[in-house]
Image: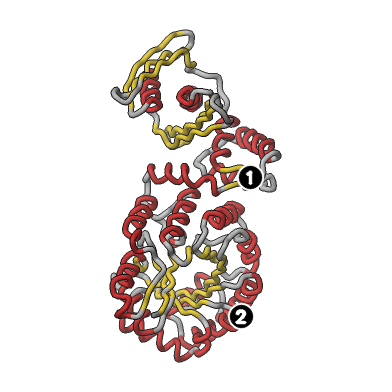
């Protein structure tokens, strides 16, 4: 029985398609879901000099407990050092060297002649294998490559220390028999492939990617499949994993995927990946932020890029205030989480004179009645009052504020946490509202979590009103 390893490429599709995008927190949540599903490896987005990329890989490495964290480093030996540093906390790290091997992609994507490309493959794979035991080489557009050059490229990668070779069918024009025949031809021409694991990655142009993957397993001895749980144009992870689970004995294959959870968890991943799914974004914020952090060693650029990933568009003055506040907090903490960074932005950025001031509020709720909130706000010395129902006391309070001010802003995120311990603990709330596409956050602290939430909501509203009127 052959053990088929599954590498999920969902996150990497972020770089393959202009119409697919995941934010920082959604990538962390995706990695955690894939880890729970039992995929053997998670292919991340490529790493570069950008500190936010390093922070992402570092955060994924901390969050993933079982799966391999596979990081593409391109053909730049300098990227190897950056990736290795970011992968320090990964239980199972992998470096992935990718190179276009067809004449067209070699010229236009890599900008290299054949001799220069071979030298770059050798240099990058050698450096990667010297620092990481698990190194993969990906032959991009392999099915359209000249066989003699493809042989040289694969031999160079294996000789330099690659332990996994992946052949990519970018064109997606082959039928299953043709694809298996191509892989067998490559095997015959490159005997050194017998010393390494062989994998495939297929375009689904003809809706044949899944069939090609099965043919590669059954007829060409492939033991690694690159598939996507959220499939845009790749091998479908759920389909292939289910097929192997159902017909594994007859085709002599098995995987480590947790089949009992397969359909349910793929559904969660699909909901997370759909554009504009606010619930998924809030779930990622609630469950994933503890695994993403900054430290006192991070530069102002890294901190502000993390702030931008949270969705904020700050002025230069606010950026300076946020970084100053971050520096003061980071000096006394080993790690500053994204939730804490959110709170820093809420407390330090765009502090404005309040237009609306809380006067009084009364909340009624219980197990036999719906929640209602009655509230009085002060605006320019005038008392404004309102009452509203809601799904819980905090929702009722927010609806009441909307009723009083006569406008409903989009609630982007809402967080609550205890900042002290004991029966009279202080609670902190952070509310993020969106107006005209821009994000505004407010903070509130109180021994009453409803009161803290009201203050946070009003703080954000006052920032919107102030900027709108200005």
Residue 48 at x, y = what percent?
59, 60
Say which residue appears at 47% left-offset and 13% top-offset.
Answer: 359
Observer able to see residue 431: yes
Say which residue appears at 62% left-offset and 66% top-offset.
Answer: 80
- The vertical placement of 350 against 240, above or below, is above
Residue toward you, 87 or 23: 87
Residue 158 at x, y = what percent?
56, 82
Say which residue appears at 62% left-offset and 64% top-offset.
Answer: 79
Q: Which residue is mark 2?
A: 160
The quadrant of the image that shows the N terminus is bottom left
Q: Is residue 125 left or right of residue 283?
A: right
Q: Is residue 381 left or right of residue 296?
A: left
- The vertical placement of 116 against 240, above or below, is below
Q: Quadrant of residue 345?
A: top right
- The vertical placement of 376 against 173, above or below, is above
Q: Which residue is mark 1?
A: 335
Determine crowd level at label 2: few under 14, some 14-19, many 20+ residues with C-alpha closer than 10 A. many
- Secondary element at tag 2: helix
Determine crowd level at label 1: few under 14, some 14-19, many 20+ residues with C-alpha closer than 10 A. some
Residue toward you, 453 or 14: 453
Residue 96 at x, y = what percent?
54, 69
Observer able to see residue 116: no
| Extreme-front residue of the structure | 423
Residue toward you, 65 or 457: 65
Mark 1 or 2, nearer chain start = 2
Which of the two discs, 1 and 2, sits closer to the camera?
A: 1
Q: CA distance from mark 1 to mark 2?
A: 38 Å
Residue 337 at x, y = what percent?
58, 43
Residue 215, label in figure? none
- Secondary element at tag 1: loop
């Amino acid at each position: 029985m052959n053990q088929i390893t599954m590498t999920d490429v969902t996150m990497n599709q972020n770089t393959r398609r202009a119409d697919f995008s995941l934010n920082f927190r959604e990538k962390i949540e995706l990695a955690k879901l894939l880890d729970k599903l039992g995929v053997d490896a998670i292919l991340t987005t490529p790493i570069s000099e950008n500190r936010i990329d390093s922070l992402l890989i570092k955060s994924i490495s901390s969050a993933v407990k079982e799966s391999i964290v596979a990081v593409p480093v391109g053909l730049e030996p300098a990227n190897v050092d950056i990736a290795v540093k970011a992968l320090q906390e990964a239980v199972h790290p992998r470096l992935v060297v990718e190179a276009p091997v067809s004449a067209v992609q070699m010229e236009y994507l890599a900008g290299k002649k054949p001799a220069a490309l071979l030298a770059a493959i050798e240099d990058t794979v050698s450096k990667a294998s010297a620092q990481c035991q698990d190194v993969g080489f990906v032959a991009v557009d392999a099915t359209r490559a000249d066989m003699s050059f493809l042989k040289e490229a694969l031999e160079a990668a294996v000789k330099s220390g690659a332990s996994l070779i992946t052949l990519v069918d970018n064109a997606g024009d082959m039928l299953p028999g043709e694809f298996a025949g191509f892989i067998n031809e490559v095997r015959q021409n490159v005997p050194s492939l017998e010393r390494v694991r062989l994998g495939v990655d297929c375009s689904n142009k003809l809706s044949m990617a899944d069939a090609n993957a099965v043919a590669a397993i059954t007829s060409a001895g492939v033991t690694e499949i690159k598939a996507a749980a959220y499939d845009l144009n790749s091998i479908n992870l759920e389909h292939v994993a289910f097929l192997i689970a159902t017909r594994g004995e007859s085709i002599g294959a098995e995987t480590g995927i947790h089949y009992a959870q397969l359909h349910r968890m793929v559904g969660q991943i699909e909901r997370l990946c759909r554009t504009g799914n606010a619930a998924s974004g809030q779930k990622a914020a609630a469950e994933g932020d503890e695994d993403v952090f900054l430290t006192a060693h991070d530069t102002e650029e890294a901190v502000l890029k993390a702030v931008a990933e949270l969705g904020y568009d700050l002025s230069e003055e606010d950026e300076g205030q946020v970084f100053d506040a971050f520096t003061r907090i980071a000096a006394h903490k080993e790690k500053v989480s994204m939730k804490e960074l959110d709170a820093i932005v809420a407390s330090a950025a765009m502090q404005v004179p309040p237009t609306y001031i809380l006067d009084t509020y009364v909340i009624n709720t219980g197990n036999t009645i719906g929640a209602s909130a009655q509230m009085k706000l002060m605006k320019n010395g005038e008392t404004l009052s309102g009452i509203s129902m809601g799904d819980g006391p905090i929702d009722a309070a927010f609806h009441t504020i909307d009723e009083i001010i006569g406008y409903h802003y989009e609630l982007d995120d809402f967080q609550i946490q205890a900042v002290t311990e004991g029966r009279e603990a202080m609670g902190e709330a952070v509310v993020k509202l969106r107006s005209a596409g821009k994000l505004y956050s407010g903070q509130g602290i109180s021994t009453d979590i409803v009161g803290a939430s009201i203050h946070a909501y009003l703080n954000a509203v006052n920032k919107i009103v102030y900027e709108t009127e200005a």
